[in-house]
Image (spheres, rainbow, N blue to C red):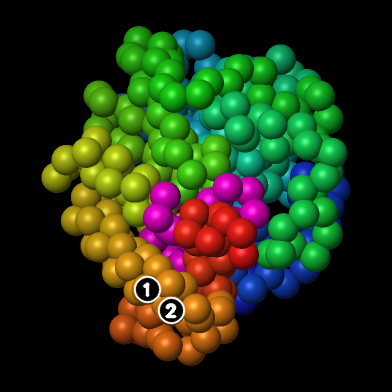
Amino acid sequence: MTTRRGFLEAAAASCAGAALTALPFVAGAKESKDKLATQDLGGGLAFITGAGANVLAFGSAQGALLFDGGMRATSKALLQLAPAAVGAKKVHTLVNTHWHPEQTGSNEALGKQGARIIAHENTRLWLARKSIVVDWAPKPFLALPKAALPNKSFYTTEALDFGGQIIALGHLGQAHTDGDLYAYLPKANVLVAGGVVSSAGWPLMDWQTGGWIGGLVGALDRLLKIANDGTKVVPADGPIIGRRELQSQRDMYFQIFDRLVKQLTKGMGPDEAYQSGPAREFEAQWGDSKAFVLASFRSLWGHYAPDA
């Protein structure tokens, strides 16, 4: 994620080779045209950009632990750079924060190498699904090969013992998908937030795979309970932020959520709701809100109008 424009280029190579073209979302599946770059966070941690989504690497005697694996097109370069950046010889463990192709592009390569791949159970199920059809991609996403599927999954929380410390993993509920998870590294005070947080534009509201705007607010509430004033929050897109920015995002999304619920209960449709400007005052900072608002409105249907 490099700009706040309303249209992003999609992946040239994605899950099982599903080719994507321009997508109408500010933060979502896209092809990375940036070169990979690393930022040393200390304590054996490196923040890597340019892989299609942010990647956090942590090194130990076991090898490297990656939080998200970038796009398939950048996987080869990432799997060379990331271990070297944290003083490891190879990747030992990969955590998928959700199922999207910019998080799971290294699954196949690492799975074939025998790496441990951890995800929420809903993420594993999506990646094994024969076909995923979503309105933000022109072609279905096909199931990943068996070797690329997460080989360890959980439902609520998981304590990951790695590199001499216990890393907390937790499900964020139905947020921007239904398989979003966070990772908190207490020694470094780093919180990996995945696709629930973007600091470079509106996040992708993937309502067709379980995301919804009320859940997005709830997920941010949970992250705020974990974070403190010194926490480095790693979003899926954009630069690292702090708790103050996390709180601002939560407040913004709650306002939009509250307005959309009122519009839905008045009988408005998605386009009418967008025309009312529920996110207008935030566009100067976050860009065109149309795609986010339309998807967020549709995400309410299953919760407030299940018979619609």
Specify whether residue 228 is in view.
yes
For the point 37% across and 45% down, the residue is 219
Total tally of numbered discs in the picture: 2
Left or right: 99, with 127 as reference point: left
Give the image quarter of residue 173. Answer: top left
For the point 77% across and 54% down, the residue is 133
Q: Residue furthest left?
A: 229
How far apart, in angstroms, are the residues tagged by discs 1 and 2? 6 Å
Where is mark 1, residue-wise?
262
Task: Tell me which amino acid carries mark 1.
Answer: Lys
For the point 64% across and 73% down, the residue is 24
Specify whether residue 78 is in view.
no
197 shown above or below 164? below
Instruction: In the rendered structure, find residue 266 and report the number of the disc placed on it.
Output: 2
Residue 201, horizontal then vertical, whole percent: 45, 68
Residue 149, horizontal then vertical, whole percent: 72, 27
**In front: 80, or 30?**
30
- Which of label 1 and label 2 is nearer to you? 2
Task: State the SS at label 1.
Answer: helix
Task: State the SS at label 2.
Answer: loop
Decide whether residue 170 is among the magenta residues.
no
Decide whether residue 204 is among the magenta residues.
yes
Q: Residue furthest front?
A: 307
161 shown above or below 211? above
**What span is colored magenta in the figure?**
195-215
